[in-house]
Amino acid sequence: MDWTAMAEPWLKSEGPNEAALAPARAALMGRAQLRPGQHVLDVGPGPGASLLDAADAVTPAGRVTGIEVAPPLADRARARVPENVDVELGDAVTHPFGAKRFDAVVSSFGVMFFANPVAAFAHIQTACRPRSAMTFVCWGRRHKNPWFT
């Protein structure tokens, strides 16, 4: 997939898209119950709105790492995040996260782009500490999704 080309329309409509998806991100963060001091992985943060939400939740004492596959989206996210956030370019199936790094994993519409979901989720799990949780939001079936109509 040409991730640079795929990113272009998202960057052009960043503001309206983030506003439209704000309720979904709020639900994601509410369900994830991130806490101060945690180290959180954000999978597919796009231009960074979910990174900002997670950074607020963990406060400066915590850390957020975003893994983004589209270079232009990673660049945009890097330009807007605070110091307690790192944005890494890579694929969730192969990225060298390091073992047992994360207390929690979140994803706002990122996991649906996995070419191999089983491999991606298994690899992400190796980067998580015991009892960590993954919370994500993604689209349902097309006919139940009003955004696609």
Image (tube, helix red, strand yellow):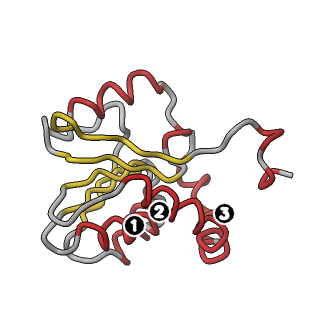
Residue 129 x %, y %: 16, 38
**Point 33% across, 56% down: residue:** 66
Q: Hey, which residue is sitting farthest top in the picture?
A: 118
> From the image, which quarter does the N terminus lie in?
top right
The residues tagged by marks 1 and 2 sit, at their Cα atoms, a distance apart of 5 Å
Secondary structure at badge 3 equals helix
The residue tagged 1 is: 75
Using the numbered discs, state the Cα–Cα distance from disc 3 to disc 2 in whole angstroms. 11 Å
Q: Which amino acid does the dot numbered 2 rest on?
A: Pro
Determine which of the numbered discs, if any, sits on residue 130 in the image: none
Question: Quadrant of the rendered structure where residue 58 is?
Answer: bottom left
SS under mark 1: helix
129 vs 56: above or below: above
Q: Is residue 94 left or right of residue 50?
A: left
Res. 9 mark: 3
Residue 142 in which image quadrant: top right
In this figure, which residue is indicated by the disc labeled 2? Answer: 72
